[in-house]
Amino acid sequence: MKISAAQRTENENRVRATMDRLLRGELPPGGRCDIKTLAREAGVDRTAFYGSRPYAHLREEFERRLQILQQAGEIPDPRAAQIVRLKTEVAALKTRLAAAEETTEALSDFRAQALARLAAQHEEILRLRETAAGDSRVTRLPAVRNQVIGTCS
């Protein structure tokens, strides 16, 4: 079915008005900032935006304007903005998790080294005690008892 030039102009004006609304972030409930929503809200068949169809130039204009907004850091679709924000958060959390895992690994290594050193020192103390016990020139001091000295009443 052919449409008249006046109907085509009217449709293009409706598409451009809808395009402006969508790019301002005025999305219908359940809609997105995409061609499907643009066609539905403008009351035009979506297939008319593809190939050599009558409104292909409007699709290109819409996509170009949307890309310019996105490059400027503006995302008219709140869900798309939320997705971008969540992806950024996930990347930051992954970085924090990697740093925490690295710290945990370093602390585990340090703990293992400290335990190995303590064990080696303990073995050295035991060896020195055995050597000292066998040497008659070494005099052992009496063990010190924990006493409370000088209690005042």
Image (cartoon, grey):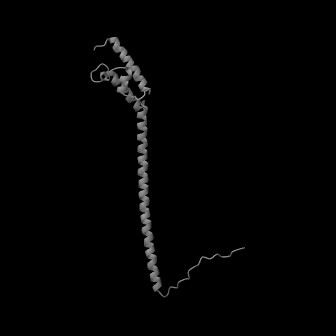
The picture quadrant where one finds residue 72 is top left
Give the percent coordinates (x, y) of residue 98: 41, 51
Q: Is residue 91 left or right of residue 141?
A: left
The answer to whether residue 103 shows anywhere in this view is: yes
- 10 lies above or below 118: above
Q: Nearer the viewer, residue 72 or 11?
A: 11
Give the percent coordinates (x, y) of residue 109: 41, 61
The picture quadrant where one finds residue 126 is bottom left
Q: Nearer the viewer, residue 135 or 79?
A: 79
| Residue drawn 44% across the image and 63% down it | 111
- 115 lies above or below 87: below
Q: Nearer the viewer, residue 4 or 119?
A: 4
The picture quadrant where one finds residue 2 is top left
| Residue drawn 43% across the image and 57% down it | 104
Q: Nearer the viewer, residue 58 or 45?
A: 45
Q: Residue furthest right?
A: 153
| Residue drawn 37% across the image and 28% down it | 34
Q: Residue furthest bottom?
A: 136
- 1 lies above or below 150: above
Quarter of the figure with the N terminus: top left
Give the percent coordinates (x, y) of residue 65: 38, 26
Give the percent coordinates (x, y) of residue 29: 43, 28
State the count of labels: 0
The answer to whether residue 73 shows anywhere in this view is: no
